[in-house]
Image (cartoon, grey):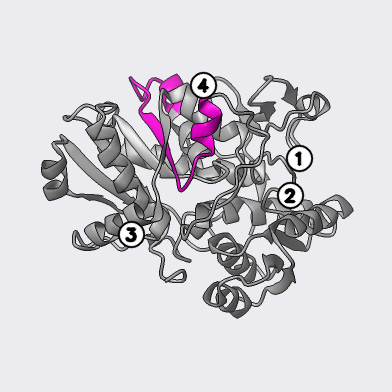
Amino acid sequence: MKVEHNPSLLGFRCIRCAKRFPIGDYFEGCSACAREGHAASVAAEYTEGAPVEGGGRMPLRCESYLGEGQTPLLSLEKLARQLGLARLWVKLEGANPTGSHKDRVSRYVVARAKQLGVPRVVAATSGNAGVSLAATAAAVGMHATILTRRGAPGRWVDAIRGHGAEVIECPDSASRWIEAGVMARAGTHYPATNHLTPPVGSNPFGVQGYKGVGYELIDELGPDAVDAILVPTDRGDLLWGIYEGLREQKLLGQLATMPRLFATEPYPRISAVLLGADYRESFEGASAQASVAGSTVTWQALSAVRSSGGAAVVVDDPVAASSRLELARCGVEAELCSAATLGALRSLVADKTLPADANVVLVITSDGSLAS
């Protein structure tokens, strides 16, 4: 199980101020931005013209422990006709080994921990990320600690424990982050998730794994076939990763025009910031869309939306629920927050943000089997 750096990896750059850093672990993002009171993550940089290997440029060369990626892309022709779209596809990330897109991150988090010789990984999560990290760690004989909040859904907790991980229940989401930060700074655990308030995003090595979604879409559909991609969004790890994968392909000349990225959310957060709110504020709300029901916004989510010419769309629970039924009638089982992308699409077509003849992809992050 050899792990080594991609020889094309130069280091990391801040996505806000563009400060460059040598190869290393920057769980708390850019130190220069932090001194200014901002929270910004860092992204991997590669040598100009570096070759693309497999699912894209990735910071580490390592095997796939579970076999994630290359998920199905399903065309919904009947629904596309109803909406007046040229084409509509769904990217079925629930087909990953543990049932969600999180497997793409867990591969590189565990690989980096192995490379550094850290025997334990930790995540502050009460859902898909915990199941994925626990399973990936188990596959390589590594110990995983998952910090959940009190009252976390029992099916997820049972699945996490089933993979042999240690589960520690914390009073609330904020205390999970505090505990994860203590473990990360002590060097006893290698962190997969964010532990700061305001957040910077998840592990920079791990988030690179999400670029594979962008690469797979263009590889299968072609360089000019996608106009818009709708992504369920909380802190924006997946949204940013897809954007980075598309941006790299555009720089390589493999993509003519950047698709617009639209973040779907259950109540105003990113949409509030785009209207003038400070991204470092807390945006409270209640929603059954548990996987994206946080109260924070990240610079990476804002950057992906703004740089691609996209937007954020609020989809409430009733619309998400009706969209879930509609997708089910098309043969697609989707977690509630993923189904919300269909509701968002209807809004974007109705208000003419998207032309009626657009080519659109909905990212279905999980089939919701554990959340149901």
Q: Name the residue that disc number 1 marks.
A: 28
**2 or 3: mark nearer the eye:** 3
Residue pointed to by mark 3 = 321
Q: Say which quarter of the image contains residue 214.
A: top left
Type of amino acid under label 4: Gly
Crowd tier of the residue under label 3, counting other residues whose Cα lies within 10 Å: few below 14, some 14–19, many 20 or above: many
Q: Nearer the viewer, residue 323 or 138?
A: 323
Q: Tell me how far mark 2 sits from mark 1, CA to CA.
A: 8 Å
Relative placement, left or right, of 146 versus 184 is: left
- Badge 1 or badge 4: first in the primary sequence: 1
Q: Is residue 275 left or right of residue 60?
A: left
Above or below 258: residue 174: below
Q: Residue at x 73, y 52 (%)?
A: 115
Label 1 – label 4 distance at C-alpha: 29 Å
Quick check: can you spot residue 71? no
- Front position among marks 1 and 3: 3
* SS at mark 3 in the image: helix
Q: Which residues are magenta?
A: 247-275
Look at the image and tell me whether residue 320 can be seen. yes
Instruction: Give the distance between the C-alpha atoms of the residues marked 1 and 3, in whole angstroms.
Output: 36 Å
* Residue position for label 4: 49
Residue type highlighted by circle 3: Ala
Q: Secondary structure at mark 2?
A: loop
Instruction: Name the mark on residue 195.
Output: 2
Q: Which callout, 4 or 2, points at the residue further toward the start of the chain? A: 4
Q: Is residue 54 left or right of residue 277?
A: left
Q: Nearer the viewer, residue 175 or 217?
A: 175
In the image, 331: left or right of 255?
A: left
